[in-house]
Amino acid sequence: MDNSSNPGRGSLGGFFGGGAPVYSHADLAGVPLTGMSPLSPYLNVDPRYLVQDTDEFILPTGANKTRGRFELAFFTIGGCCMTGAGFGALNGLRLGLKETQNMAWSKPRNVQILNMVTRHGALWANTLGSLALLYSAFGVIIEKTRGAEDDLNTVAAGTMTGMLYKSTGGLRGVARGGLIGLTLTSFYALYNNWEHLKSTAARQSL
């Protein structure tokens, strides 16, 4: 009998059980990677350990996975400025067309409409940008003071922003601005936690 087909048989290695089995390409072709035996014959590792269920990035020591208010402040201020500029430009275009509707299409009418667009765009961009700056500053200060980040910081920052922005109108203006800021930020916090509140109410009803 030819022993070349099975090198582990008829040798000292086969006697002591040290002979490693030899697989051919035909033997390995039908071996599934998953199923009864998830061990891969090619990698000799369990493929389940190769599945990445977590985020594939490294965070600095002590860093959070979510961005803080200071990091979000730049996005908030820039986004409010661009939103205000876009809304103001559209409003200026509407007012410009309304005020010049009796004029024929000419260069003076185009200049007047353009002036309305730029003036209202800059006004709204400045207004919303100032509000976003105050809101972000109050949010960062409250977060650092309390040492926590939650919806209470959002509501408090919005209320203080409204109070300070309307402080030139006296006590009535301060109260009105604080009430507006409190209402808007409360609705925003409620919107962010709506799914959590629904799931909590569903669990309590069971």
Image: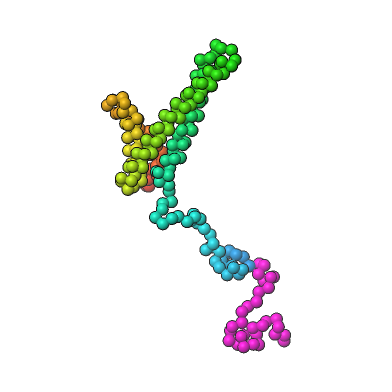
Q: Where is residue 87 in the image (x, y as percent from the top left)?
A: 48, 28
Residue 5 falls left or right of residue 54: right
Residue lying at the far top in this picture: please name it: 102
Along the line of sight, the residue nearer the viewer: 113 or 194: 113
Give the residue drawn at x 42%, y 44%: 71
Residue 21, magenta (yes or no): yes
In the rendered image, the quadrant that contains the N terminus is: bottom right
The magenta stretch is 1-30
Can residue 51 be seen here? The reply is yes
Give the residue drawn at x 54%, y 62%: 50
Residue 136 against residue 87 in the figure, above or below: below
Q: In which quarter of the image is residue 72?
A: top left
Residue 103 falls left or right of residue 180: right
Q: Position of residue 127 (x, y in %)?
A: 42, 29
Residue 128 falls left or right of residue 15: left
Q: Where is residue 202 in the image (x, y as percent from the top left)?
A: 39, 45
Residue lying at the far left in this picture: please name it: 171
Count the marks: how many?
0
Magenta span main SS: loop
Along the line of sight, the residue nearer the viewer: 2 or 77: 77
Give the residue drawn at x 32%, y 38%: 156
Give the residue drawn at x 45%, y 55%: 59
Can residue 154 be seen here? The reply is no
Along the line of sight, the residue nearer the viewer: 14 or 201: 14
Q: Where is residue 93 in the image (x, y as percent from the top left)?
A: 52, 22
Q: In which quarter of the image is residue 46?
A: bottom right
Residue 23, magenta (yes or no): yes
